[in-house]
Amino acid sequence: GKPLADLIDYRYYCAEEELELEVEKADGEIWLCEVEKDADEDLGLVFTANVFDKIRVCQNHCLFCFMDQLPPEHRSSLHLKDDDYRLSFLEGNFITGTNLKEADIQRILELRLSPLFFSIHSTDPVLRSRLIGNPNGAVLPLLERLIAGGIEIHGQIVLCPGVNDGAALAQTLADLERLRPGLLSVAIVPVGLTDYQRREGLRLFTPAEAADLLDMVEQKRQKSLHQTGSAFYFPADEFYVIAGRPFPPYETYEEFPQLENGIGMARLFLHQWQALRP
């Protein structure tokens, strides 16, 4: 009697040892299956997607949105900008939280959907509103509420030189440090630009700026390691490329918490390559 909106519903309701499964076949015929199983036993069903009621799309107009910088001749699936907390939990996608309703927050807390991955960019609500193109820019209260409810979070900052770096970045990092240990890690990623971007005020980092950023973050990493045992901050591989510096040692990335964000991917590749060399 419980309709399934996504894979989370499926896993939650299938945890019972006895359940009834109602299936509508392609010809409209309804099957009612009575199932007895172990509590941790799966039904063996495979779905074509992790959400069944349409992906929740992004309501923002981010200054640096990479998808807005795509060439006009590309496949339609690349137009889809998801901002779905369910895909954040199930697949590690980053969300902004601007489209979360109270019912969504309650569901996250009740089902303990953790960890979640948040695009933070800035803790200043005015600056974040400018960055994401949405007046609902405040993110700290939402993060604080989720963490207080036992939800663990990985964060990312897309850094735009002259916009949210410098003093703005220093304030953001200071605010985020107060969210530990519920905030597990913070990735710092440089803005990426293509020939198709049309936003004014955006540019790439210079080698000197990238080097300064790495020096500043390394000081904070060492302080965090001394205080908590975790580096907490993870600069993107691109910063090392831009600055002309070697990638940090393998151990620097701990358990590679932001690998799906590309953080540490170059070092992991080199590590695995070295292990395979005769």
Image: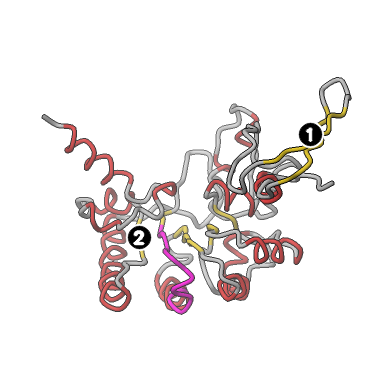
Colour scheme employed for the rendering of this structure: secondary structure
The residue that appears at 48% across and 75% down in the rendered structure is 179
Q: Residue furthest left?
A: 278
Residue 4's quadrant in the figure? top right
CA gap, disc 1 and disc 2 = 49 Å
Element assignment for label 2:
strand
Magenta range: 176-188
Note whether 1 is above or below 166 in the view shown: above
The residue that appears at 56% across and 51% down in the rendered structure is 199
Residue 108's quadrant in the figure? bottom right
The answer to which of marks 1 and 2 sits earlier in the sequence is: 1
Q: Residues within 10 Å of mark 2 (few under 14, many from 20)?
A: many
Residue at the disc numbered 1: 33
Q: Position of residue 135 (x, y in %)?
A: 69, 66
Residue at the disc numbered 2: 234
Element assignment for label 1:
strand
